[in-house]
Image (cartoon, rainbow, N blue to C red):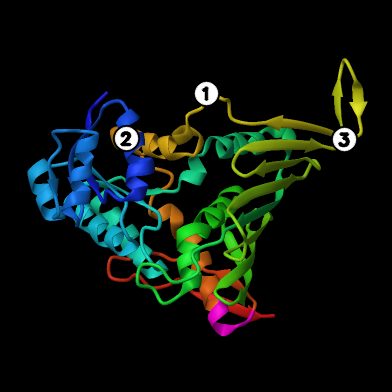
Amino acid sequence: MAVIRIGIVGLGAQMQENLLPTLLQMPNIRIVGVCDITAARAAQIHRFLSDVPVTASVDELLTLTAPDALVLACPPQAHRDIALQAMRAGIHVFVEKPPCFTLDELEALVLANRQSGVITGVGMNFKFAKPIRQLRDMTQAAPFGRTLHVQLNHYASKPRAPLWGLDSTLRSFLLAQAIHTIDLGITFGGGELTGIRSRVQRYDDSLIVNAELVFSSGTTASLLCGTMFPYFEFDMKIVSSTSMMVELDNLWNITIHEPEHGTRATGTAKRWRGVWQPGPLDSGYERSGYYGELFEFFEAIRKRETFNANFESLLPTYRVIEQICAADSQDIGVVQTFALPTLHATSTANPGVVSNVL
């Protein structure tokens, strides 16, 4: 297996607590340099690897170490700018979420990615969490039938002020936290995203977001999320055409509800429930999705295949974010019908949108 040379950009809390420990567990990955605007923070890599050069300049990192790929954990504006620089240089790039602030910026990243031909990835660890993988296997099995509805609840207590220099707490929350929830709604919805209805409620510095998504498959998804809650909690319910329901509790337990279930020992019961959860020996980084996302990103590099959490994969998620923000600015609930965009070398325009005010 070919060794992939990695340059790290941004050695803050997310990198030190989640991404770096995951990278250190991976075979045939060599960290060749670390960049951070704070020299003392960059030097903290020496607690883990004693001989890795550090720098405060991305230009110097690229020149001195010639990495095959960059792994970034920075503010979104740095993700955007450094990713563009890396792609122009033919370097594969993985950024923590969010990769940028707006749909326009994401479309520019997608266009640059298509022109460069490198592998890109975004740190959507929920998608790669072991319980989510198990949930996808369950819902794709023939006995489950067709997914009809997905309910996602994402409770949080922050942020209650704008992040990263933005002037919107709503956009900050959607990018920092709800991006996972929206992405999973789209993942399990199937087909093209064809409509969204949303409403934002506020009290003091907190907010609640309700959104309804509609897909060409006929599936619907309901999202309840916000910062009005006392603690973090995440759960999902998926209802099928066979009257089965699977429920995910806090990215941990999965409960399967069936209208009836027969066994030789007990015969047929009117209702039946089975439970799945990660094994006690599952590592935290594997269970939470950090190992899976990075492992598959590097495999995509080796095989020259598209990584399924790349910049382009987030276009529907960013369309939802833009529509929620737009509806909130108008202080109305709206139904949006999307015309999927065609990206051209000379344009990164927003997709055409038809709005029906309720």
User: Does the magenta portion include 70?
Assistant: no
As drawn, 159 above or below 303: below
Task: Give the number of the mark in front: 3 or 2.
Answer: 2
- Marking on residue 23: 2
Magenta region: which residues? 327-332
Give the CA distance from mark 2 to mark 1.
Answer: 19 Å
Q: Is residue 330 magenta?
A: yes
Q: Amino acid at mark 2?
A: Leu
At x 28% / y 65%, what residue is drawn?
345
Q: Secondary structure at mark 1?
A: loop
Residue position for label 1: 281
Residue occupied by mark 3: 271
Image check: 67 left or right of 137?
A: left
- Are the residues at dot 3 and dot 1 in contact (C-beta closer than 8 Å)? no
Which of pointers 2 and 1 lies earlier in the amino acid sequence? 2
Q: Residue at x 74, y 36 (%)?
A: 256
Q: Which amino acid is tagged 1?
A: Leu
**Do callouts 2 and 1 mark residues in contact (Cβ within 8 Å)?**
no
**Where does the image place residue 98, in percent across and percent down from the top left?**
40, 58
Label 1, residues with CA under 10 Å away: few <14, some 14-19, many ≥20: few
Q: Where does the image place residue 94, in percent across and percent down from the top left?
A: 32, 47
